[in-house]
Amino acid sequence: MKTLGKKIRLLRHQKGWSQEDVAKKLDISIPAFSKIETGITDINLSRLEQIATLFEMSVVQLLTFNNTEEEQKFVNELETIHKKLTERETEVIDLQKKVIELFEELRVKKVTA
């Protein structure tokens, strides 16, 4: 529940809303909403639907929502790793070509010798 609370807090901050703003929109007390954000209180399905609607998303979107900055960081890391892997593959291919060339040179020298 703490992870869900963090997601809700992040969404609230993105909207520029205070805890009081959200509590009023949900028709609950500020301490009750604070407990939701901190993960102290379990959220029932109807409250979850209410929160999802407030942030203009489905319950599934709310539950699977991730911080885009963190996602972007992982995407950037993956791109960097992919680039390095591609470079290594190119190096391996070049080395394979050299081995084949050297083998052919040895074969030709044995045939002519």
Image (cartoon, rainbow, N blue to C red):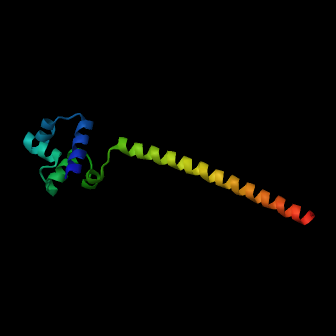
Residue 35 place in picture, x, y as percent: 12, 46
Against 63, is 29 above or below? above
Q: Residue at x 27, y 37 (%)?
A: 14
Q: Is residue 105 visible?
A: yes
Q: Position of residue 100 (x, y in %)?
A: 76, 59
Quadrant of image for the C terminus = bottom right
Residue 11 against residue 86 in the figure, above or below = above
Q: Visible in this render: residue 26? A: no
Residue at the (20%, 47%) spot, across then down: 5
- Closer-to-camera residue (113/6): 113
Q: As drawn, which residue projects farthest toward the right?
A: 112
**Residue at x 73% of width, y 56% of height:** 97
> Which of the two residues, 22 or 96, is positioned nearer the viewer here?
96
Nearer-the-camera pick, 48 or 97: 97
Q: Which residue is the extreme one toward the front? A: 113
Quarter of the view holding residue 12: top left
Left or right: residue 60 compared with residue 104:
left
Quarter occupied by residue 55: top left
